[in-house]
Image: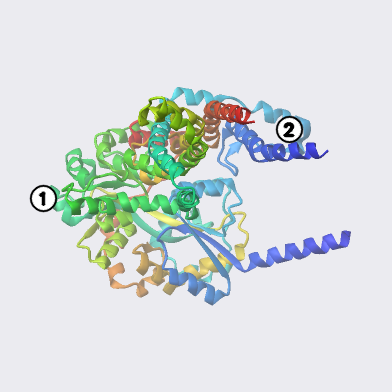
Amino acid sequence: MRTTWVTMTATLALAAGMAHAQEVRVYNWSDYIDEDLLTKFEEETGLELVYDVFDSNEVLETKMLAGGSGYDVVVPTGTFLQRQISAGAFQKLDKSQLPNIDNMWDVISDRTDKYDPGGEYAINYMWGTTGIGANVGKVTEILGEDAPLDSWDLVFDPANMEKLAECGVHFLDAPAEMIPAALNYIGEDPDSHDPDVIAKAEEVFMPIRPYIQKFHSSEYIDALANGDICVAVGWSGDILQARDRAAEAENGVEIAYNAPSEGAQMWFDQMAIPVDAPNPEGAHVFLNFIMDAENMAQASNYVYYANGNKASQEFLVEDVIDDPAIYPSEEALNNLFTTTPYPQRVQRDVTRLWTKIKSGT
Amino acid sequence: MKRLAVILLPYSWLVALFLVPFVIVVKISLSDTELAIPPYTPTLDFSQGWEGLKSFFAALDFENFVFLSTDDLYWKAYLSSLKIALISTFAALLVAYPLAYGMARAPVEWRPTLMMLVILPFWSSFLIRVYSWKAILANEGLLNQFLLWIGVIDSPLTILNTPTAVYIGIVYTYLPFMVLPLYSALEKLDGSLLEAAEDLGCTRFQAFWLVTFPLSRNGIIAGCFLVFIPVMGEFVIPALLGGSQTLMIGKVLWEEFFSNRDWPVASAVAVILLALLVVPIVLFQRNEEKQREAEG
């Protein structure tokens, strides 16, 4: 009897172990990869890929802090990465398993060092800016030909918002990006952690909040493309995807993205391996696959986000590498700001302020 | 022995699936946040023995419940959920009653088919059904296209992302929970009672109001509770169809849990929500018991 149990348990454990050894589970942002790459990965490596998506850092972070997520690769944004590293959520990368790491671009890794000094825990997947997407036809029809499409005035000036409300304005439901944008607009330090300074964002949002139809972090792609809304404060590549979907649908909707001239936030989505990843070896294989110059270029060509991979640039199509909305000029880069994570006490103030902005309570 | 097993089974079910999770939530609500995995402290560590247990209990306090009372956001969210739950329960009753009445009056051979039609939507995913309402209610959606086409309106109505869309979504989703108990109450109704009422000089409307309606009371009560209780804690429908102005406690709980990473406060919000729902749940149970006795 006893031996039977031992054999059975051993067989089960072996079976489970084998299943894990052949499977890599990746948790990435929605609309963030060319799905052909997923098939290509499986064909090249013989590993089975389980690919799930999320649309907010908060959801990912809760999974990471609960532990036992079962994922091998996850993609938090820099600020969130930094906090999760200090919570002990990630394991250090074994760079001997990542020969393609030489392809990475120092312009980006210098900036991501702020969150993950020396890149010990994560590699850059893509980066972008948080700015404004507009349905050019509708906005100029409402505000006139000189509508400030490349200025935060478009959404933070109540006079403009009052008129735009009828055709629909969405904001990201991401306080860690919307509050810095408002602070930057009124000339404060966007990365301020001082509760008194953060409170000033309220004055920017309160007059415009009745005109904001929705705070959401992924719906605006389709809503912009279909012409359901005319302005969205969102992430660069997402808005460019909306632009392309509208162009493909030939529905007469023309979308433009701008990182506003007053300054916009620059962010970095980093791929990291959870400390309790079932298959860290497979995770390294995936990271190395992603850092391959041609693969990375294929992903960027598809999702219209810039990446942190220098070697991939020769494989990028002109639409991507030459578009200043995706790869800003040196000068424009200097106009972008980055932020750092809020401490717990301040985080509570920020969320409370955000709830007040969203619900009026 | 057999009797014991019969009693034990449902109770062990209750302990495993309700009591144990509830005790865990209460425990977290008495803890403090910490940047770690899991993100709260203290956690139970049996290796420390008795001393560890003592310091564990010493670290628990009611701070989070005190905090909830200092910010008016929380009671406003509870009240707003209550309002939404009450209005949508009433709206669902108004829609469901004629439906159930019609079903109960239909020829006997039709009834299984009609019943089937009410249940049929459950065969597709709840999320897909709520998402399709987005396509119907959007500015460029089916409803607006249709209304523009027949010329009732000349610019699209903004329905999606407003409280109206939330009510539509809730009433649609919970309608079967209202229809089924109403139908079972109305179906049992003895038709000769109505004939007697009319013989005694009631108009058809009076007969309905004095005979049918009171006799369907139990169905109404059961349906209302079945809709009201889950709607109080509803999160998905307002998140998908509502805009920023729809304040509900489910959303506040989400924010605490996800945006603030404050599991203790989120748990405190959940404990209070449950405490508030215990009242209607107990009333519902008593109504069911009374009904069983009356029939027994």
The numbered dot on residue B109 is none
Which of the 4 image quadrants contains residue A206?
top left
- Residue B133, above or below A42: above
Q: Give the camera-side residue of A137 and B245.
A: B245
**Residue B290, image x, y percentages:** 59, 26
Q: Is residue B283 left or right of residue A140?
A: right
Callout 2: residue from which chain? B
- Quarter of the N terminus of chain B within the rendering: top right
Amino acid, disc 1: Gly
Q: Give the camera-side residue of B231 and A19.
A: B231
Q: Residue at x 42, y 74 (%)?
A: A294
The numbered dot on residue A144 is 1
* SS of the residue under disc 1: loop
Q: Residue at x 53, y 29 (%)?
A: B277
Amino acid, disc 2: Gly
Callout 1: residue from which chain? A
**Residue A139, image x, y percentages:** 17, 51
Q: Give the camera-side residue of B166 and A330.
A: B166
